[in-house]
Image: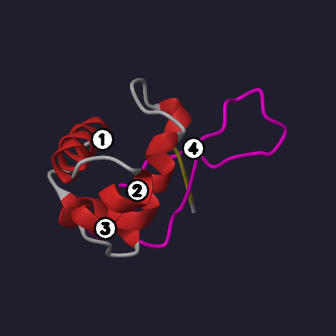
């Protein structure tokens, strides 16, 4: 299963890294350190991402998207992508 962030307006390529780290169960402070941002900035950005993806919070994201490959690929890319949203 693939979650293509490019189909969600407002999400960026850099969000892929954040969400991958969330799925790896990294704490916000460790994610912040890895991407050279403040923990509050990461928490705020992830809350915005969760809202755009239609999940309530971190646990909602993990339970919905665990096992997904997270990518950011525009439809013009050559690889075919399953862009279906989870039910």
Marks 2 and 4: in contact by CB < 8 Å?
A: no
Give the mark toward the camera: 4 or 2: 2
| Whole-percent x, y for residue 29 in the image | 23, 63
Q: Residues within 10 Å of mark 4 (few under 14, many from 20)?
A: some
Mark 3 or mark 1: name the one nearer the start of the chain: 3
- Relative to 47, 33 lies left or right: right
Q: Residues within 10 Å of mark 3 (few under 14, many from 20)?
A: some
Marks 2 and 1: in contact by CB < 8 Å?
A: yes
Name the outermost residue toward the right.
Answer: 78
The relative height of residue 38 versus residue 61 in the rendered view (above or below) is above
Mark 2 or mark 3: name the one nearer the start of the chain: 2
Q: Which residues are magenta?
A: 63-87
Give the mark toward the camera: 2 or 3: 3
The label on residue 49 is 1
- Describe the element under mark 3 as helix, strand or loop: helix
Marks 3 and 2: in contact by CB < 8 Å?
A: no
Mark 4 or mark 2: name the one nearer the start of the chain: 2
Q: Residue at x 42, y 52 (%)?
A: 35
Tag 3 residue: 30
Give the mark toward the camera: 1 or 4: 1
Marks 3 and 4: in contact by CB < 8 Å?
A: no
Tag 4 residue: 83
Give the mark toward the camera: 4 or 3: 3
Mark 4 or mark 3: name the one nearer the start of the chain: 3
Tag 2 residue: 19
């Amino acid at each position: 299963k693939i979650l293509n962030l490019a189909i969600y307006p407002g999400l960026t390529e850099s969000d892929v890294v954040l969400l991958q780290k969330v799925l790896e169960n990294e704490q916000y402070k460790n994610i912040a350190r890895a991407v050279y941002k403040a923990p509050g900035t990461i928490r705020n950005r992830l809350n915005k991402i969760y809202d755009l993806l239609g999940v309530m919070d971190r646990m909602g994201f993990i339970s919905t998207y665990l096992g997904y490959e997270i990518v950011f690929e525009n439809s013009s890319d050559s690889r075919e992508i399953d862009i279906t949203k989870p039910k």
